[in-house]
Image (cartoon, helix red, strand yellow):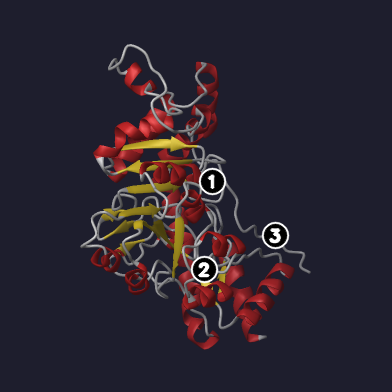
Amino acid sequence: MTDKPEILFNKASVEGAELEHIRAALESGHTSSSGPFSARVNELLRAETGAADTLLTTSCTAALEMSALLLNLQPGDTVIVPSFTFVSSALAYVREGARVLFCDIEPETLGPDPRHLAELLDDSVRAVVVVHYAGIACDLDGIREVLKDRPDVAIVEDNAHGLFGRWRGRPLGSIGRFATQSFHDTKNFVCGEGGALVLNDPDDVQRAWVLYDKGTDRKAFFQGFVDKYSWRDTGSSFGMSDALAAYLLGQLEQRDVIQAKRRGVFERYAEGLAPHAEALGLRLPVVPEHCEPAYHLFHVLMPDHETRTRVMKELKEEGINTTFHYVPLHDSVGGRQFSARPTECPVTTDISSRLMRLPFHNNLTADDTDRVVETLVRSMTGV
């Protein structure tokens, strides 16, 4: 064991006026959803994505569940989901009665593989969930080409990692019919727990608000379009508390500062490991030229599973916390239960067994990243 300070894997931080905003929200008397701080956050998100509208939710999972409701899924419908993602990406659609088809990932960006997507596509498919892993855009050119003759198939961007990332100059979260955001404690911008549904098709806005307001036309009432509001549709209580929106606003007001910090951490890792990567058999993140990352995380692909297990243990003994990412969904108990049919995802299986995430948070210092790099290199070389 080491006597050096522990390097945490993740640490949420106050970056601006978060605490002042929370106090103002509490003193205003409006702490439930759809308050003044929620309005300011939604305005900012709409400006960033160009969305028709955005709705703050209690989590990214809740936003995915809203997208599933808006798809009007019917018995026999399927949704294609990458196997290499968090369970919410599939669970939201299973809850609405759909079956899922698990798509393998391509080995560069670790997003859905368009070639496998093309093999899976059939008349039952109603949506494709794409994940921008680590905040680096997946192969959207390939995915859009596969779907060019299927306008009936919606693209849902699970953009939990990708806020403020870009693909060919376009904001991540602006490409699909729907996109979902996460403001969980582990993300770039946090409020403890929270998310957002991004609506890029204006035709979805009216019904989305009914679903958001527990199946009522409450928003139309407050806009003066109806003289009373009543039950109209299915829905739930999806809204984020305005107190949490207040905290989130403080974070988003500091988005340039936060993103600059995270880019610095990403680039220090890349610069420190690049000279050793080939000799050690490491692969660093791949960022295509047409992509601007959101700098959500930094991962390395180890030569094999056994090396990863050993190195993670040795780094832990040196006070450095790392983790792996995503147990493949296609061969999980739930995945086998709710899939429309078995699919083979060999790249997912391989990547999942070798991927290791390094400590990454806003205020990780240069000394911290240097120590991580030096310890990782030493562990792999035995020097």
Q: Secondary structure at mark 2?
A: strand
Point out the tag, 1 or 3, that comes first from the N-terminus.
3
Quarter of the image for residue 155 reads bottom left
Which amino acid type is marked by label 2?
A: His
Neighbourhood count class around disc 1 (C-alpha, 10 Å): few under 14, some 14–19, many 20 upward: some
Residue matched to label 1: 184
The percent coordinates of residue 151 (x first, y second) are 23, 55
* Mark 2 to mark 3 CA distance (whole Å): 19 Å
Label 3 amino acid?
Glu
Mark 1–mark 2 Cα distance, whole angstroms, equals: 19 Å
Name the residue: 52% across, 85% down: 281
Q: Which mark is residue 117?
A: none
> Which residue position is annotated with label 2?
299
Q: Position of residue 76 (x, y in %)?
A: 41, 55
Give, as a three-letter code, the residue at label 1: His
Question: Is label 2 or label 3 in front?
Answer: 2
Residue 219 higher or lower than 47, as above or below: above
| Secondary structure category for the residue under label 1 | loop
Residue carrying label 3: 6
Q: Nearer the viewer, mark 1 or mark 2?
A: 1
Secondary element at image label 3: loop
x 33%, y 70%: residue: 114
| Mark 1 or 3, closer to the camera | 1
Q: Is residue 182 left or right of residue 332?
A: left
